[in-house]
């Protein structure tokens, strides 16, 4: 039997349905911890703080409704998205959500219950990742969507025309796509870090530094970054001025399809690493 | 996965936590029945249980449970239930949810998971508290609900780390009866406990541990026979103990004979119990004494523990 035929047979023989059901059940159990716990308040705050600011801007600056201001507000929204959401809000929220998936249960000394059921540990990683990704999606997609709508609703018919007859709708879809990719990209990194380090905060900050200096790294290293792919997908390019250029400049432009596939490949590689790591993970609460 | 191997096998298993020894060179073969792990704190009982269930990995050696290893959790944990010593629970769960959700992960649909959950909760007498949050349970209730979870999927191997801790005398008696019932159904029941009298009463075999090593293992009476440094104590209830004492003093292997304070019994310490029983039969047949009862006085876990590990087991 050829290796390809063997691989095909292996794929057919695996209990994919059972694994999917188990991953979904784990995600369902964990979702309550991520989305509805009191501990999650600061994640809500990180997601919706800009929404509150843009809402306030709508109320306070209701007189500014000309086309010139619309162009300016488009840049403001791009700045909020690229500098706040992409580099800080989603980054730190994912750090909180995804590192807590395993470390939270280690802190509560309840992870062993998940290791004592007939579930492959790799499926456990995927279930927890799904739960974290869903939590981050729900919060940040809602927040980005709300920010966008509030920013342009402010302009009345002019804003509607921008959204429905101009480039607005494409901008919205791209922001939502980048948000989703940021959630899975950063999520996978923090999930993997939480399985390697007892305190993933310091390594998390190192990741942040890596992401910040990434544009000045050699081209090959730039590809080992979540932000590298996300920047390429942002619909509005911000002027590269001062230190903030580190967050916004696109050093090596790549096509959107390559950016999406590249990020998904990085995410898959990091999740595979997490799956390998969980196989040898030991329950030793007293030393954690 | 159906397996014909119904034993739990440790082959030269060692576990080190950095430079700290957990267990060292453990070779054990456990057959179905009730097996008690006995030893002082830090002797390696919990390490052995965690190794068996894959919560920790051996530094050396191999472990197989009914022919399966911890690398195959999908099959292993259909056959194994483990009630750990960790007195902690997922945040915010009720007793019912604590058992129900793991059963869903076993692949049971809602109806069967619900049925198994209620059955397990009923078995530990917690039905009235099932819908309450575990955080509001007493220590004994938490212990019982963890026990219920460990047996809820009808495992073949139940591993119980200090399962009697925190239970009141009534619950303790009920739990011991439950263990006996599980053992009689051909299951493996592996218990670690420091309550040696209760362990003694229910165990088919004991594994004595000290400082990470298995000091002795087997059926309690066999283990006792192997402890040759300490003469066996035999209590004879009879009509004329002083007469019997004068007879036994003539034997070389009898090192001590002490008349009971009530004057109706004789406590013998002998290096050769078989020879002593022969003598006793002879003197009874000759009508020298009227024997009411004969029983080993130190043929129990507590005494063996004391002889082998050197304490009375109170800190086990």
Image (cartoon, rainbow, N blue to C red):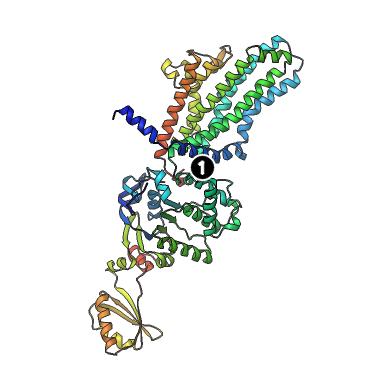
Q: Note whether residue B85 is visible.
A: no
Residue A268's x, y, as percent?
A: 44, 27
Q: Relative to A129, is B132 on the left or the right?
A: right
Residue B78's x, y, as percent?
A: 43, 48
Residue B201's x, y, as percent?
A: 41, 68
Q: Quadrant of the C terminus of chain B?
A: bottom left
Q: Note whether residue A69 is visible.
A: yes
Label 1 sits on residue: A105
Residue A91's x, y, as percent?
A: 54, 27
Q: Residue lying furthest bottom in this view? A: B287
Q: Residue at x 36, y 30 (%)?
A: A8
Q: Nearer the viewer, residue A234 or A117?
A: A117
Q: Nearer the viewer, residue A227 or B249?
A: A227
Query: Alpha-carbon neighbours of circle 1 within 10 Å: few (<14), some, or many (≥20)?
Result: some
Q: Chain of mark 1?
A: A
Q: Residue at x 57, y 51 (%)?
A: B96
Q: Relative to B244, is A30 on the left or the right?
A: right
* Count of all numbered marks drawn on residues in the image: 1
Relative vertical location of residue A187 with respect to residue B277 in this rendering, above or below = above
Relative vertical location of residue A90 with respect to residue B314 in this rendering, above or below = above
Q: Nearer the viewer, residue A44 or B213?
A: A44
Relative vertical location of residue A65 with respect to residue B265 in this rendering, above or below = above
Q: Relative to B99, is B263 on the left or the right?
A: left
Of helix, strand and loop, which one carries label 1? helix
Relative vertical location of residue A169 with respect to residue A184 in this rendering, above or below = above
Q: Residue at x 46, y 39 (%)?
A: A18
């Amino acid at each position: 039997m050829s290796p390809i035929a063997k691989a095909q047979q292996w794929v057919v023989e695996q209990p994919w349905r059972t694994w999917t059901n188990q991953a979904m059940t784990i995600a369902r159990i964990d979702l309550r911890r991520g989305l509805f716990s009191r501990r999650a308040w600061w994640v809500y705050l990180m997601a919706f703080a800009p929404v509150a600011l843009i809402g306030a801007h709508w109320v306070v600056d209701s007189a500014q409704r000309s086309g010139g201001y619309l162009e300016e507000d488009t840049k403001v929204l791009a700045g909020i998205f690229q500098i706040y959401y992409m580099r800080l809000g989603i980054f730190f929220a994912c750090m909180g959500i995804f590192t807590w998936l395993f470390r939270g249960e280690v802190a509560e000394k309840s992870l062993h219950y998940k290791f004592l059921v007939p579930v492959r540990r790799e499926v456990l990683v995927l279930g927890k990742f799904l739960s974290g990704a869903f939590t981050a999606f729900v919060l940040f997609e809602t927040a980005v969507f709300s920010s966008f709508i509030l920013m342009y609703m402010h302009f009345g018919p002019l804003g509607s025309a921008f959204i429905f007859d101009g480039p607005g709708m494409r901008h919205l879809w791209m922001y939502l796509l980048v948000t989703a990719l940021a959630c899975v990209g950063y999520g996978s990194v923090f999930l993997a870090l939480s399985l390697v380090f007892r305190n993933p905060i310091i390594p998390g900050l190192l990741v942040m530094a890596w992401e910040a200096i990434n544009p000045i790294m050699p081209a090959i290293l730039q590809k080992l970054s979540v932000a590298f792919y996300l920047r390429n997908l942002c619909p509005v390019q911000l002027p590269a001025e001062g230190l903030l250029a580190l967050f916004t400049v696109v050093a090596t432009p790549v096509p959107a399809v390559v950016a999406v596939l590249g990020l998904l490949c990085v995410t898959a590689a990091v999740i595979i690493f997490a799956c390998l790591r969980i196989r040898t993970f030991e329950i030793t609460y007293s030393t954690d | 996965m159906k397996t014909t191997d119904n034993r739990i096998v440790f082959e030269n298993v060692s576990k080190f936590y950095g430079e700290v020894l957990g267990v060292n060179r453990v070779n054990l073969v456990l057959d179905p029945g009730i097996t008690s792990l006995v030893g002082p704190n830090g002797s390696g009982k919990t390490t052995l249980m965690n190794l068996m269930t894959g919560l920790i990995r051996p530094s050396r050696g191999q472990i197989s449970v009914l022919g399966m290893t911890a690398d195959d959790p999908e099959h292993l944990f259909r056959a194994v239930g483990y009630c750990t010593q960790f007195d902690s629970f997922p945040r915010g769960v009720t007793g019912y949810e604590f058992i129900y959700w793991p059963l869903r992960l076993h692949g049971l649909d809602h109806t069967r998971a619900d049925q198994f959950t209620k059955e397990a909760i009923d078995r530990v007498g917690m039905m009235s508290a099932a819908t309450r949050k575990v955080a509001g349970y007493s220590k004994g209730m938490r212990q019982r609900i963890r026990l219920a979870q460990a047996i809820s999927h009808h495992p073949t191997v139940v591993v119980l780390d200090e399962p009697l801790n925190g239970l009141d005398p009534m619950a303790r008696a009920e739990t011991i009866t439950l263990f006996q019932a599980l053992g009689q159904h051909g299951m493996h029941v592996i218990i670690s406990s420091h309550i040696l009298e209760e362990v003694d009463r229910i165990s088919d075999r004991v594994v004595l541990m000290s400082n990470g090593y298995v000091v002795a293992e087997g059926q309690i009476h066999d283990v006792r026979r192997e402890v040759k440094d300490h003469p066996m104590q035999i209590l004879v209830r009879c009509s004329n103990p002083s007469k019997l004492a004068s007879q036994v003093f003539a034997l070389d292997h009898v090192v001590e004979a002490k008349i009971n304070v009530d004057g109706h019994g004789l406590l013998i310490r002998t290096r050769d119990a078989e020879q002593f029983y022969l003598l006793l039969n002879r003197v009874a047949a000759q009508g020298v004494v009227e024997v009411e009862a004969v029983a080993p006085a130190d043929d129990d876990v507590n005494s063996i523990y004391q002889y082998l590990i050197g304490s009375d087991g109170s800190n086990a």
